[in-house]
Amino acid sequence: MPANLPPQYLEAERNFRAAKSAPEKIAALEEMLAVMPKHKGTDHLRAELRARIAKLSESMGKKLATQRASLIIEKEGAAQVVVTGPTNTGKSQLVACMTKASPAVAEYPFTTHSATPGMMEFENIQVQLVDTPPLTEEPEWWLVNAIRRADGLLLVVDLGNDPVAQAEFVIALLARKRIALGKALSQEEAMNVKKTVVAANKTDLDPGGQSLRALRERYADLPVVAISARDRSGLEDLRYEIYRFLDIIRVYTKTPGSKPDFSNPIILPEGSTVENAAAAVHKDFAARLKYARVWGSGKHDGMMVKRDHVLQDGDVIELHA
């Protein structure tokens, strides 16, 4: 086995060994591929896993394979956030309010039966929100896999129906699948830890704010945003929290003598360097990079920096090769 495989890979490998059905095995193999580092040492293993997936897909038959493929939502935009929670918390209505998607919305439980993606705008970037069926005691394999693959989770609870109990149900359920929310179980090895924002929906059903206070006290380590999808209140605060918890930065490029294009930022993880930004522009550019000039986070606009200079959100860089 190649070195430097992360704990998430080893956990997915255990899930593969424990899986009983072909879809569950494929879900585990895809998770192994998703978390595997990409370098020459993993090329052979990557090819082997893809071959296993192809063989299992063939064994499922055309109808089941097509159905499975339709349940995999490819990531778009700056990040993918799965919207999850118990039944009838208003997930679909919230996604409809925050994106241009049109998931089924109704006042009765279990309206959503499949995954529906939509793009949420935040300033000059877009984040993909994926509406999913409500979590039950035995969620379908593809739903658990979608949660594992996502960059983060938006947990929606109903302030009018004991939101603490709802959150506890979700956290316990996902813990059985070796998935942890926020910092709740981050110290346990082999847990797939997901950055999470809690949307405390239906503020009109909690006029005194008691349920909201109880929720915030119980989950002080998670950002809890009070909203009403029906009244569209609190949605701007929620957009900001979703952006903030993704731990990404926006960096803009310019050529000498020209103005930067602020409409199309490079999206990078927090802590990224000038070299990382150069690699995002072109994979070969980083190797030829001599220096860069930075506007924004430096002490002086246009200051010359080396490739290991750590960038901040909103920086403008001029790359010189």
Image (cartoon, helix red, strand yellow):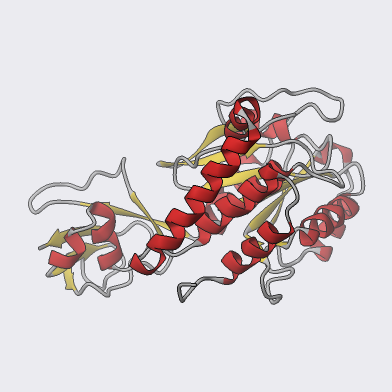
Going by the image, does 287 lie left or right of 201?
Answer: left
Which residue lies at the image location 67% right of the left edge and 25% below the top edge?
A: 103
x then y, percent, for residue 91:
73, 36
Which of the pair 97/79 is nearer the observer?
A: 79
What residue lies at 74% left-to-right and 59% top-to-bottom?
18
The residue at the point 23 percent across, 60 percent down is: 278
Q: Is residue 74 above or below residue 187?
A: above
* Residue 62, image quadrant: top right
Q: Is residue 50 visible?
A: yes
Q: Position of residue 61 (x, y in %)?
A: 63, 30
Q: Position of residue 171 (x, y in %)?
A: 80, 58
Q: Residue at x 30, y 64 (%)?
A: 276
304 to the left or right of 198: left
Q: Nearer the viewer, residue 104 or 39?
A: 39
The correct choice, above or below, for 238 with respect to 316 in the image is above
Q: Residue 216 falls in which quadrant of the image?
A: bottom right
How many numbered discs? 0
Q: Horizontal and vertical percent for residue 52?
A: 54, 50
Compare residues 184 and 22 and report the one nearer the observer. 22
In terms of depth relative to the viewer, which is nearer, 115 or 229? Answer: 115
Q: Is residue 241 visible?
A: no
Quadrant placement of the C terminus: bottom left
